[in-house]
Image: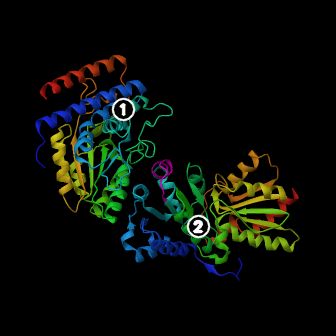
Amino acid sequence: MNSSKKMVNPRNAYGEALVELGGEYKNLVVLDADLSKSTKTIMFARKYPERFFEMGIAEANMISAAAGFASCGKIPFASTFAVFATGRVYDQIRMDIAYSNANVKIFATHGGISVGKDGASHQMIEDLALMRVLPNMTVIAPSDATQTKKIVHLMAETYGPMYARVGRADAPLIYTTGDVENIKIGKGIVVEDGADITFIATGTMVEPALEARKNLLKQGIEASVIDMHTVKPLDTSLVLKYAKQTNGIITAEEHSVIGGLGAAVAETLTEKNVSTKFLRMGIKDKFCESGDPADLLEKYELNSKHMVRKAKKLLKK
Amino acid sequence: MKDLSEKKLRQLELMAVKIRKHIIEMLYKAKSGHPGGSLSAVEALVALYFVHMRHNPKNPSDPDRDRFILSKGHAAPALYAVLAECGYFPVEELEKLREINSMLQGHPVCKCTPGVEASTGSLGHGLSFANGVALAGRLDKKDYNVYVMLGDGETDEGQVWEAASVASHYKLDNLVGMIDRNFLQIDGRTEDVLKLESVRDRWTAFGWYTIEIDGHDIQEILDALNEANSHKNQPTMIILNTVKGKGVSFMENNVDFHGVPPNEMERNLAIEELTLVEKKLEAML
């Protein structure tokens, strides 16, 4: 991890964004399921208590109630951990939000295995897949605090069902406030350009991909790094462009290799008959375990070291 | 509220018969759907839409409207018939229930059918949705009320009890629930499938004000709705004691008509029975 970059927690960025938006959007309401201190919705609750709704440990009710708020012209943000925000309430999201095309924003924290010591019960690695398969749903995994803040603003500004997830941990700042104009839902960002291979990463995997690029550069390999914060709708033209102009694609996500970013990219490449060297990095169809986040990312091969190794191997194929 | 005139009451009862005839014709034409729970819900819907609720079929999205949410979405035919008779859409649309390219889906879908507030059909969601609507109304200082109809079997769902807790916690006195207590669900008697009694004690224990009435008596329903609206600091649950398949002799209390439409002979018999009641009521006007 790059020690020169400032570490900021994307969850705090979420809380700050809600507070900023609360002044601008009088119809914005926030719901939480007894995790407001962790999801940081508590920041909004302190500033706008009348528009914050503590719904208790009753996520199904929270999601359907959020849809009820939306039916009255409110912009509800519903938050809890990613495990509870998707899998536990899949039917409520499907019926009341996606099927109804309701203007509900689900913002989840604690996505992925870097949740760490709580173990697999709390490590959500299926959420992107579950949300991506729902018609009408936009799916986003911001990569740093700056981007998170911008994405939350865009979620409020843009009509439609949306799901966004960040991790638990602090994350290095990739973007400065000057970069935010280039952050648009559905548009991937080319953070670094290189001719040899392309990392298409989402969320917490963008920073390790940037680290991997640096190390590969020392070995004479130039990698592009694309921050694909929006997993759905996927920026397919960017995927195809880099599939053609570099010699291979590696997708990286703190998520199962099934159904998420890697799957979406694979579907795009296959359907467009683009033949390229291709590898999905993610959790390989298994549940993980308790442990220090860095140890977990090492064991399950989701850090810059493994990215370097796999990039070299892929190019040799 | 004072009692309705005899004449007005007869007119509402006539409307209930008309709705039942629509239900039978719709399900016969669609060759699928749920007669039993549609027929048991008719009087409550008639009381709400033709007397009690503040709503305007010409402006279904009026922000000040009272809202009705059919949590037991399989009773869609009853809701559609009532909405059509109110003028939300032409009565002719009813013939297209469950057909391809129709605005009348097998279960209610908001943004598809004018007047439908929430997409239902997966049981247990409606009361939660209503929590959001009621909280939003309070936040906006609006005086609308939210009405939700649940099936009795539907209250097997855990989400209903999440919603019950939250509504009571927030003292949502602009929220009125109605349970269509017809004692039957697909697999049999509610008390055999998964015991519900005492329904009233359960809701009371969850902090709700409860009223128990004859769910086919329009005057009783209207009185209960008024009582619910004037009760403060608590949500109200009205337990409607009903008969599944009400109004069609061979469907009444017959669990086989939960989700099976009438065949031609059954449809003819049902329409004949309902026409007799209709004529009797007309003669009383």
Q: Residues within 10 Å of mark 2 (few under 14, many from 20)?
A: many
> On the rendered structure, is B142 left or right of A76?
left
| Towards the viewer: A61 or A152 | A152
Which segment did they paint magenta?
A94-104
Give the position of the C terminus of chain B as an image quadrant: top left
Q: Which mark is residue B277?
A: none
Q: Toward which corner of the image does residue B45 lie, by quadrant?
A: top left
Task: Name the secondary structure under disc 2.
Answer: helix
> On the rendered structure, is B125 left or right of A225?
left
Where residue B106 appears, as percent x and y from the top left, is 43, 36
Give the labeled residue for mark 2: A151
Q: Which mark is residue B91?
A: 1
Residue at the limit of the structure toward the front, as seen here: B58
| Towards the viewer: B247 or B195 | B247
Rendered view: B181 above or below B263: below
Residue at the limit of the structure toward the top, as seen here: B265
Where residue A118 appears, as percent x and y from the top left, is 54, 67
Identify the chain of the residue marked 1, using the numbered disc in the image. B
